[in-house]
Image (cartoon, rainbow, N blue to C red):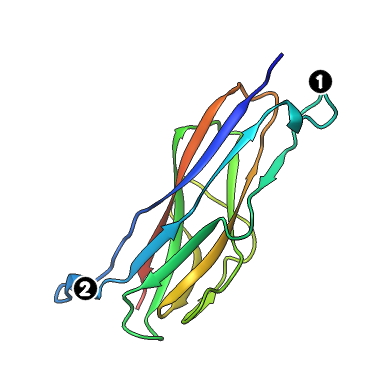
Amino acid sequence: MRFLIKIFIIFFLAPLFFVPQTAHADRYIKIKVTGNWSETIDKKDLLSGAGSDLKSTYTSVSGQVSIDIRGTKGINDAWRIDIRKVDNNWNDNLHPYVMRTSDGKGGRVSGGTSYQEVTDINTPFFSGSGKVKGINVQLRLTGPSIQIPPSSYSTVLYYTVVDIQ
């Protein structure tokens, strides 16, 4: 029996701006997200060969995703990154997680340094202020099991920058 679950986690940008009505478009805080992750799970992931279950956790490399924040009004211009997922073909037993693994360069960044499950509701991930480049994020997937029907599963993670000042 050949068992294959193919899991793709793809990252897109979904900016959200809170801007006074008199502001111009060039004053928005902007976010740039780069990176994606896919994992092929097959018989080599069985814990003890035929008849056993799969490894239950898969983790990307530390800088699988990189986030840049620009367009701030200076070092004290505060912002927050929210995250959510939108499923394409997904199984409810699969759970994606994110964790910030670096502060990047410039500005200030705080929070997000432990794994947080990504749900279909916008949830605060981490916050900061000023322009920051190269904030690294690591991804984790839990829940794969031979009980999940073989298929190609995919979800999209949306990172949203919110101007909080």
Looking at numbered disc 2 in the image, what kind of residue is underneath it? Asp
The disc at residue 162 is none
Q: Earlier in the sequence, mark 2 or mark 1?
A: 2
What distance separates the C-alpha of mark 2 from that of mark 1?
A: 58 Å
- Which quadrant is the C terminus positioned in? bottom left
Mark 2 touches mark 1? (CB < 8 Å): no
Q: Residue furthest right?
A: 48
Residue 15 locus on image (x, y percent): 33, 59
- Which quadrant is the N terminus positioned in? top right
Identify the residue at image location x=58%, y=31%. Answer: 6
Looking at numbered disc 1 in the image, what kind of residue is underneath it? Ala
Q: Which residue is mark 2?
A: 26
Q: Which residue is mark 1?
A: 50
Q: Helix, strand, or loop for circle 1?
A: loop
Residue 163 locus on image (x, y percent): 34, 72
Report which quarter residue 96 is drawn in. top right
Q: Helix, strand, or loop for circle 2?
A: helix
Identify the residue at image location x=52%, y=68%. Answer: 135
Q: Residue furthest bottom?
A: 75
Q: Residue furthest left?
A: 22
Q: Residues within 10 Å of mark 1 (few under 14, many from 20)?
A: few
Residue 113 locus on image (x, y percent): 62, 66
Would you place residue 4 above or below residue 139 in this image? Answer: above
Residue 37 relative to residue 12: left or right: right
Residue 71 relative to residue 2: left or right: left
